[in-house]
Structure formats: structure tokens, C-alpha cells
Amino acid sequence: MNTFKEAVHSLWSSKQRTLLALLGITIGIASVIALISVGSLVEREAMKQFEALGTDFLLINFYPENSDAGRFPVVTDSHVNGMENEVEMISMAAPIVEAFGEPIYRGKKIDTQMYGVNSSLAQVHRLTVEEGRFISDADGNSQYCVIGANVADELRQYGPEQLIGEQIRIDKRIYTIIGTLARMPEGGIMGFDANTAFLIPMQAAGRISGNKSIAVVHARNNKPGQTDLLREEIDNYYKSQLDNIRTEVETAEAIIKQMEKQSKMFTLMLAAIGSIFLLVGGVGVMNVMLVSVSERKVEIGIRRAIGARQSEVQSQFLVEAIVLCLLGGLLGVIFGVLSSYFVARASDWEFFISGNAILIGVIVSSVVGLFFGFYPARQAARLDVIDCIRGS
Amino acid sequence: MSSVIKIENLFKSYYLGPVKLPVLKNISMEIFPGEMVSLMGTSGCGKSTLMNILGLLDKPDEGQYMFEDESVLAADDNRLSIIRGRKIGFVFQQFYLLPKLDIVNNVALPLTYQKVSTRDRRNRAIEYLEKVGMGEHLHHKPKELSGGQQQRVAIARALVGNPSLILADEPTGALDSRVGQDILDTFIRLNEEEKITVVIITHDANVARQCKRQIRMKDGKILPAENYKNEP
């Protein structure tokens, strides 16, 4: 305790030098903290997109087993229904038929993504209708459409507040708006963004593209954590139904795992960059401590003459270096958290203080102090007492 | 009565490159409790080297040194630090107070290395400051005091650990003669009233003369007592 008080006292009495030494270590710790916490903010933000939709979400894509074999398999609505019944791990599934075209409203091109769907898409994606109704299975190939919130906003710029019943032209066909979707909290996930979607009945889509086969199935599974088994069961089911077919299943879970891995790498890289700053800061502390030792030779000589052991002189200087680094670390934590707060605000991310970052700041700065303070402290302890006293 | 210091046949040389410079040549002496001894000689006679060895800051090349019956030449640095802290009080020509600490904390400093509690350190520091007539200046910094006052504080610091021996190296050397005499009187009083053993290293014959016993050095040797009258 006493050594600590003395260290604070000594640092306080040479403020200018202390400030200089602090600067390096503060910048070092601040950058480590800022980098790490910005890293975890990014991670949290990316995860939120998945959490909004649910980690049980999955996509099934279909491919011919052998693309030279001629006929492509045609996956139909009834195959998807069959899968819902036979593959127990699938709790619900929504088939999607590809459709291409440029929707035009009152002469203006609309920025949107077209999908041929049936009523089950609303359950799988937890969509709610704002106005009108969703596509129903009774719509057949009626030329109706349901539009996402962003699309609705765009249309309102050119026309009336009330969009139900308005007409949109795609090539030579006219589609009537029967519903608009409530805004989804988060944007796209795995290629599907309800806010920019333009949904038409599956059969109608088949007529536009000329391809009746279902291109992709959006589904949810009820047994998370068994991705491999899920893949196998789905593949087996379609193989039992169709020739020359192969499925690829992407699960939100697998993607999250991949993202977690990437973000760990990212954080690691940021930490490595931060460590370089810390190294520079640490060398600064060592330099300042070495200067301090040579300026205080007389003091060291006096202390040794009146009974201080080598170890006591060493710990005096070591504690000083550690206190210095901890002080720098504390300031660094404050600046680091503040700057990640501003980054979060500027990027419109949710801000949180990572307890880990603070812990890391405190531990790392003491370790830096210990490491870079050791050499100067040992120098101080090993000085020749007579040289110290007579040298002045 | 056993001696505080007993040295026998001390030799010490320094090397200037390949040239060997003998500094102490076969020094023997004994100092007893309650003595007040001056160690006098011109500069370069080896008295500073002897003082460093007596104060356990340096070691001789050859010889024996018993400090209160303990052979100190074999002791390690830790043991030497402990003996310095508890049994020897140093007074230097340049006072050597720590400029950042106030007077009380300067005097209490040796006690921090003896694991004395904060309250006891403070009380003992004040007690010894009063003994040397500095009880009024407890919270001044050294630079706010005159040279004579600073040397009094240094004496209080040397006394605070209740040592067996005070080693004073030219204690009056940086002071004018009136103030120097004052400091010397303080040593004389402490020796007479408190029976404190004092060794004063000096080149000043006037200072040496006022000590009960005088030891004179020349060219690294102690001169026999009968020769003193012939020396300047």
C-alpha cells in the first residue's frame, strides 16, 4: 500500500513526464478497446438480422444430379407439401418460383425483386399484411400482387395514398395490387428481403418465366443443431420422389457459425493491430522510466544507504510503471468506449459496453507495465550505491 | 566491552585501466560504543574509501571487518541493507534529503524499510526532529530550509532508526564555519547526552580536534598517534 502511495506521489511530482508516458499507453489501450468493441458491435449487428428471422430458418435449392443428363427435374407444390409431411424436422415450408420482369407503375420503373409464392410464405417469414390481403392458394394464376413496405413507399411517391386496386404492368400483363406488407424490422436475410419484395401467385410466375419448377424452398426446422441430419433427410426425400436431383440446404445456423468464425478472426486481427499500438506505448513507458531512473540516481543511492534492499528499490520502480500503465489503461478504456460509442451512433448500431473490453484493458495495461517496467526497475535496483551518491 | 567496529588488515585498490592504485594499505582499527572519533586526512588519502567500507557500501579486497561481532564481508546485499538500515545512520556533506518529500517524511524514510507502522514512523520522526531543534518545520520541503537546517534534518534521519553508529562524511563541509560549528556541537551533545557513537570523516583539523579521539590517515595508512603533532 505504501509503495503504491509513494508511486502515485512520485508520478504526481513529475507531471509532465508522467503525462508523456501516459499518452502512448492511453492511445494503445484506447485503440485496442475501440477496435475490440467496434468488432463486437458489428458482430451483434449482423446477428440481429438472423435473430429477427430466427435461427431455425433454412433454404433448399434444387440442382440436377447430372447436368448433362438432359431433363431437369421439375419440383412441384405437391413435392414440397409431401416433404412437410414426411421430413419430421421440417415444421413448415414455402415454395418459391423464380420470376423475372420489370414492374412499371404509371410509366416509372419500380425497384423490386419478384417472387412467385403461395400463402405459406407469410408463415415462414412471419409476414404481416398492412392493407388488403396476402396471396391465397385460391388465387391460381390470377394477376394479383402483394408488395413490400419499401415498394409501397416508392409507389406512393407517384400516386395515391391508397394502393389497393392500383395496377402495375410487367411486360404486357397487368397486375392488381391486393395487399401491402407491414415493414419488417430488419432487411434482407439469405437473399430474401420482404421490404423490397414483389409477390405474385406461383402459377402466375410460372407463366412469366415459362419454368414451372420450384427454384427454392424457404422453410423452418424444429430441431436446431442437427444440420447434417437435416440435409440428409431432405436430400433423401427428394431423391425418392424425383430422378436426377440433388439438393443444397443452407441453414441460418450454419451461416451464423461461419459468421462467428469470421468475426473472431476479425477481432483477432483488430487485437493484433491494437497490440502494435500497445507495444509502442510500452516502449514509451520503458523510455520514460529509464530516464526517471537516471535522473533519480541520487534518490536511489540515498534510499539504498538508509536501508532499502535491491528488491525494495526494484518494486518501487515497478509499481510506478504499473501505476502509470494502469492510469493510462483507465484513460484508454474511457476513450476507447467513448469512440466506439460514437462509431455506433454514426452507424446507427445499438451500443453496448463490453465488459470483456474493460477487463482486457485493465489486465493488458498491468501486464504492459510489468513487462516494460521490469527492465528499468532492475537497472535501478542494480545501480552501484557509491556511484549514485558520489556521482552527483 | 565489545567494539562497534573492528577492522583488521584492510587492503583496497582501484584499477585505472591496467594500473593498480592501492588506496587502503593494511588498515586496522577498532571503535567502541559511545566514542566520538574523527577520521582525518587530506583529499586522496583514502578516507572516503574507508568510510564507504565502514558504511557497508563497498567491500575491501582483503582483510577482516566485524560490525558488532558480525563478520560483514561475507554477508549478502540483503543482509548489508538491513544492517545499514538498522545499525548505521549516514550524514552526508550534501545533506541528501529527498526534495519531493517534506521534512517529516524525509526523517521517517528509513523506518519505511523497517516495516514500522505509519503512525509510529511519524511520531518517531517528530521526536527526533525536536531533538535536533527542527520541531517547528515539520511540513517544509528541504529547499525551503537553510543548509544548516537541512543538515539538522539529515541528522534526525540518521538517528531515527536508533542506530549503533553515526557515520558523518564531511558534515560541515558545505556550511559556513559558524553554522558548521553548530552542527558539530549537535554531534557533541548527542554523543555526550545520548551516548551515540559518532564517526566524523573530515579534512578540517578544527573539526577533528573537537572529537574525543582522532584518527589520521595519509597515503592509505593510519598514522600512529604520536605523529599527529607534525601533521598540518
Image (tube, coloured by chain):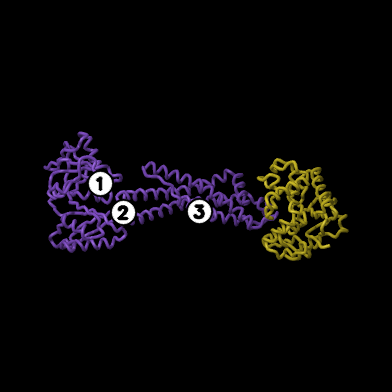
Chain colours: A purple, B yellow
Could you tell me how many numbered marks the image carries? Answer: 3
SS for dot 2: loop
Mark 1 to mark 3 CA distance (whole Å) = 47 Å
Q: Earlier in the sequence, mark 1 or mark 3?
A: 1
Q: Chain of mark 3?
A: A
Where residue A55 is drawn, which disc sits there? 2
**Front-lying residue, B220 or A9:** A9
What residue does disc 1 label? A127
Q: Chain of mark 2?
A: A
Report whether mark 2 lies on the same chain as mark 3. yes
Amino acid type at image mark 1: Leu
Does any portion of residue A24 appear in the rendered image?
Answer: no
**Front-lying residue, B11 or B56:** B56
Mark 1 to mark 2 CA distance (whole Å) = 16 Å
Position in image of residue A295 (x %, y %)? 62, 49
Drawn side of residue B178 relative to residue A3, left or right: right
SS for dot 1: loop
Position in image of residue B43 (x %, y %)? 77, 53
**Front-lying residue, B171 or B186:** B186
Q: Chain of mark 1?
A: A
Q: Residues within 10 Å of mark 2 (few under 14, many from 20)?
A: many
The residue under the point 15% across, 59% down is A73
Position in image of residue B65 (x %, y %)? 76, 63
The residue under the point 12% across, 60% down is A71
Amino acid type at image mark 3: Ile
Q: Residues within 10 Å of mark 1 (few under 14, many from 20)?
A: some
What residue does disc 3 label? A363
Amino acid type at image mark 2: Thr
Mark 2 to mark 3 CA distance (whole Å) = 35 Å
